[in-house]
Image (cartoon, rainbow, N blue to C red):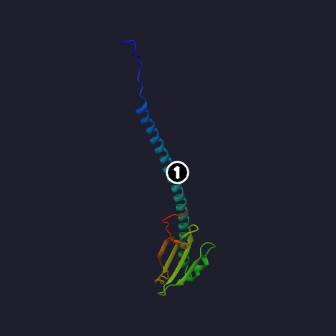
Amino acid sequence: MSANKRENPIINFGASLLLVVFLILCLVTFAVLTLSSAANDYEFSRKLAVRKAAYYEANNQAEYLLKEIDQMLVDGNDWEQAVSLSTETVSITADLDENNVPVISYSVPLDDAQALSVCLELFPADAAGDTTYHIRKWQVVSTTEWESDDSITLIYNN
């Protein structure tokens, strides 16, 4: 070997350093996306649990009122006396529909915007004197007015 030639190891960091930096950026990006997705899933499941609990509570209250109305009818009371079972949150109406069929309706609030609406259609007393009913409606309804927003901003002007 000649004396002029030095033996310095050639260190090439360029390509491997760029690859490592790219991999770290990818891992950090995926970690942030995973945390964001997990936080959104947690918030959604928390809201869903609150909504389900409110629905089951309203459903239990509606079932309790149905039991009270059923007991009132079994005891031979007039179907119009179901109005007396009204509470401060639940108002019960007893009326005749357009076909002159007795109907008992009530609505149990779920939250500020929804309620569980129940409608019972009563049948005349049978041979034993028992008044029977058919559940015409048992569904969640909106208690607020829907407002549409048809405006679309196509071009933003300063």
Where residue 155 appears, x then y in whole percent? 49, 65
User: What is the crowding at mark 1: few (fewer than 14 residues within 10 Å), some, or many (at least 20)?
Assistant: few
Closer to us: 94 or 39: 39
Residue 78: quarter of image = bottom right
What type is the residue that disc 1 sits on? Ala
Residue at the outermost left position: 1
The answer to whether residue 148 is above or below residue 40 is: below
The front one of 59 and 79 is 59
Q: How many marks?
A: 1
Image point (53%, 58%), residue name? 49
Front in this rendered view, residue 39 or 14: 14
> What residue lies at 54% left-to-right and 66% top-to-bottom?
60
The quarter of the rendered structure image containing the N terminus is top left
Across and down, in percent, residue 74 comes to: 53, 78
Q: Nearer the viewer, residue 40 or 124?
A: 40
**Residue for point 48% across, 50% down:** 37
Most extreme residue toward the front, as rendered? 4
Residue beneath label 1, please? 39
Please tell me whether residue 40 is drawn above or below residue 27 in the rendered image. below
Residue positioned 51% across, 81% down in the render: 103
Disc 1, SS? helix
Q: Is residue 19 above or below residue 115?
A: above
**Relative horizontal placement of residue 88, taking residue 50 as reference (left or right):** right
Quadrant (top left/top right/bottom left/bottom right) for the C terminus: bottom right
